[in-house]
Image: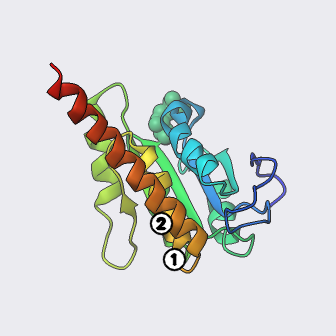
C-alpha cells in the first residue's frame, strides 16, 4: 500500500542476479528504537546487492498497518520478510500468520530481561505457522538467511554466498597465523 514508507537502495548492480530495483526483502520492526539492531540486516542486503525496503510496523500500536503490510507483501513482489521486535514481540509471528512468504524473526534485546522475552515470544510459534528465528540482536544472520532463501535457483547469489563464507574462513585463518607469532 502507498501509505507504507519505503526505503530501498537506488539500484542493484550487475552480477547480483537481480536487475530490478523492486524490493525483494521487507525489513520491518516494531519501533524506530529497533533500528540500530536491524540495520546490519540492511547492510548484508546492500553487500549482496539485493533490493529491500525498511519500515516500521507495530503489531500493537499499528495493527491495521500490520494486516495491510502482511496481506499485500507477496503481491507487491516481496520474497521474504525480516521482522524484528522486542519485549512482547508478536510482530514476526503475526506477519507469518497472514502471508505465505518466509518470515525471519529477530529478537531485539530490550532494557530488561536481556532479550529472552523477545526470543521466547518469537521462537515459540504454534505448529503450522513457522518463523525462522535468529539469535538475539543478530540481524546480520537474518540478512544472510534472506540471501540464502533468495539464492535458491539464483547461481550468481550462490556464488556470492560461497565467496562470503570463504572470506569468513580467511579471516579466521589470518587470526590463527597472527596468534602463531605471539
Ligand atoms: C516493541 O517494543 C518494539 O519492537 C521495541 O523493541 C519495544 C520498545 O518500543 P519503544 O517503546 O522503544 O517504541 O514493540
How far across and down, in percent of the image, does residue 51 sit? 70, 56
Q: What crowding class fits label 1: few (fewer than 14 Cα within 10 Å), some (14-19), or many (20 or more)?
A: few
How far across and down, in percent of the image, does residue 162 sit? 44, 62
Residue 179 visible from this viewpoint: yes
Towards the viewer: 36 or 65:
36
Q: Where does the C terminus fall, quadrant-wise?
A: top left
Q: Residue at x 28, y 61 (%)?
A: 124
User: Does the beta carbon at disc 2 come under 8 Å from ligand 1?
Assistant: no
How far across and down, in percent of the image, does residue 56 sit? 63, 44
Residue 90 visible from this viewpoint: no
Q: Residue at x 41, y 47 (%)?
A: 167
Q: Give SS at disc 1.
A: loop
Towards the viewer: 140 or 91:
140
**For mark 1, what is the residue?**
152
In the image as oriented, which residue stretches furthest toward the top?
Answer: 182
| Lateral position of residue 14 relative to residue 30, left or right | right
Please give the count of numbered marks on the rendered protein: 2
Task: From this view, report whether residue 40 is shown above or below residue 57.
Answer: above
Gap in Å between the C-alphas at discs 1 and 2? 7 Å
Q: Quadrant of residue 42?
A: top right
Q: What crowding class fits label 2: few (fewer than 14 Cα within 10 Å), some (14-19), or many (20 or more)?
A: some
Q: Quadrant of residue 52?
A: bottom right
Q: Where does the N terminus fall, quadrant-wise?
A: bottom right
Labels 1 and 2 touching (C-beta < 8 A): yes
Q: Give SS at disc 2.
A: helix
How far across and down, in percent of the image, does residue 65 sit? 68, 55
In the image as oriented, which residue stretches furthest toward the right?
Answer: 2
Q: Which mark is residue 137?
A: none
Q: Which mark is residue 148?
A: 2
Q: Residue at x 52, y 30 (%)?
A: 36
Amino acid at each position: 500500500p502507498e501509505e507504507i514508507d519505503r526505503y530501498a537502495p537506488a539500484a542493484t548492480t550487475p552480477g547480483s542476479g537481480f536487475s530490478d530495483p523492486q524490493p525483494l526483502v521487507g525489513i520491518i520492526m516494531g519501533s524506530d528504537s529497533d533500528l540500530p539492531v536491524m540495520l546490519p540486516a540492511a547492510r548484508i542486503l546492500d553487500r549482496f546487492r539485493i533490493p529491500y525496503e525498511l519500515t516500521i510496523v507495530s503489531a500493537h500500536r499499528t495493527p491495521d498497518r500490520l494486516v495491510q503490510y502482511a496481506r499485500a507483501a507477496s503481491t507487491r513482489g516481496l520474497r521474504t520478510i525480516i521482522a524484528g521486535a522486542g519485549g512482547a514481540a508478536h510482530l514476526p509471528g503475526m506477519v507469518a500468520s497472514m502471508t505465505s512468504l518466509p518470515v525471519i524473526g529477530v529478537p531485539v534485546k530490550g532494557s530488561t530481561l536481556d532479550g529472552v522475552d523477545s526470543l521466547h515470544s518469537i521462537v515459540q510459534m504454534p505448529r503450522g505457522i513457522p518463523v525462522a528465528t535468529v539469535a538475539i540482536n543478530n540481524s546480520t544472520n537474518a540478512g544472510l538467511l534472506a540471501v540464502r532463501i533468495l539464492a535458491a535457483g539464483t547461481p550468481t547469489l550462490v556464488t556470492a554466498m560461497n565467496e562470503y563464507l570463504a572470506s569468513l574462513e580467511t579471516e579466521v585463518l589470518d587470526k590463527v597465523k597472527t596468534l602463531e607469532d605471539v
